Image (cartoon, rainbow, N blue to C red):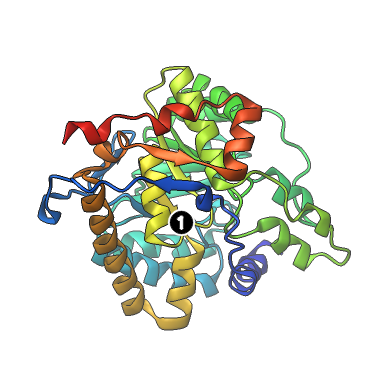
Amino acid sequence: MRISRKMEHVHHALQLGHSDEHGFRDIKLIHNCLPGISSDQISLQTSIGELNLSSPIVINAMTGGAHETEEINRELAAAARETGLAMAVGSQMSAIKNPEVESSYRVVRKVNPGGIVFGNLGSEATLEQALRAVDMLRADALQIHLNVMQELIMPEGDREFCGVLERIRTIVDQVGVPVMVKEVGFGMVKESAEALFQCGVRIIDVGGAGGTNFAAIENARRRVPMDWLNDWGCKTTIALLEVLEAKHRNQIDASIIAAGGISRTLEVCKALTLGASAVGMAGSLLKVLREQGTEALVTQIVTLHEELRLLMTAMGANSIERLHEMPVVITGETAEWCAARGVDISSYALRTGYRKV
């Protein structure tokens, strides 16, 4: 049943953890020995679409839809409230089909009435369901998640994916809040991003491989696993650069969210420097919450902010926008993939941000 599956996913996500094969070792930040700024000048404010955020870190979609998950969403919402982070809930389809579990989602707005909250549905959602999801949370935005391979491996998963772009276009046009489309750990490439841009989507979460592995999670639930699919998809750095290439090539005013195994401040800074407007974190935050509690999670987020300010000072970037102008070198498998796919990475190394100090 769908409800019991929610806690299975949480259990397996914590048990399997992250592979850390997200590609960020291939990204080399360049030290600036003349930064020309002080730490008290650093601003962490950013924007994604029409939304202004006080932090580039987003608590990304995790769970909901079962009475057992209500506590998790309650404590994540409390941490978001205390640290000023935006927060997404897990797929609300279970509550739309089974209203008795709505409280596992509504608790987020109840605990954090003034915060930025994202609703969440799969790509099978209709406009009516999207409107119900937004209303359920008084959501500031709606995530539409793409999880084709997870569904295909899932024993009870979907096998039909027709009409996705048409449904997304309708939701973007009529739901009344910003719509972001996100992958769930298999990454996105430039062709998919371009198709979404054509549908009016202006916020994309690249959801690359390297974090919570939903192929492995579903294989852990199968009687006969298909383990040969556990490394399906592209790494987070590759997905981010692919989507950024689509944005730049098509001259689209879009916000890109980096997500997929990001757990450390250096990875956050690298993603932002490449060009992400925000960074989604999920599994690493859930691990802290479940093992150490809400207070420890708040402390962890505060530490991430302090360390990010330190790194931005060292680079001479007093804002997220300035980070986007700083040179960065791309190496290894990420560079090899980009070369094969026609993604220009030389321009990243030749940025002139340091010269503007």
Which quarter shows the N terminus? bottom right
Dot 1 crowding, Cα within 10 Å, few <14, some 14–19, many 20+: many
Note whether residue 122 is visible.
Answer: no
Q: Amino acid at mark 1?
A: Val
Q: Residue 96: x, y in percent?
A: 55, 51
Q: Image quarter for residue 216?
A: bottom right
Most distant residue in the bottom direction: 292
Q: Who is closer to the viewer here, 244 or 14?
A: 244
Note whether residue 208 is visible.
Answer: yes
Question: Is 274 rendered above or below residue 115?
Answer: above
Q: Image quarter for residue 98?
A: bottom right
Question: Is 54 rendered above or below residue 222?
Answer: above
Q: Who is closer to the viewer here, 174 or 238?
A: 238
For the point 34% across and 33% down, the residue is: 49
Which quarter shows the C terminus? top left
Give the side of residue 47 with respect to residue 265, left or right.
left
Question: Is 8 rendered above or below residue 31?
Answer: below
Q: Who is closer to the viewer here, 131 or 236?
A: 236
Q: In terms of secondary structure, where does tag 1 sit?
A: loop
Give the side of residue 31 with respect to residue 233, left or right.
left
Q: Residue 17: x, y in percent?
A: 59, 69
Q: Pointer 1: what residue? A: 89
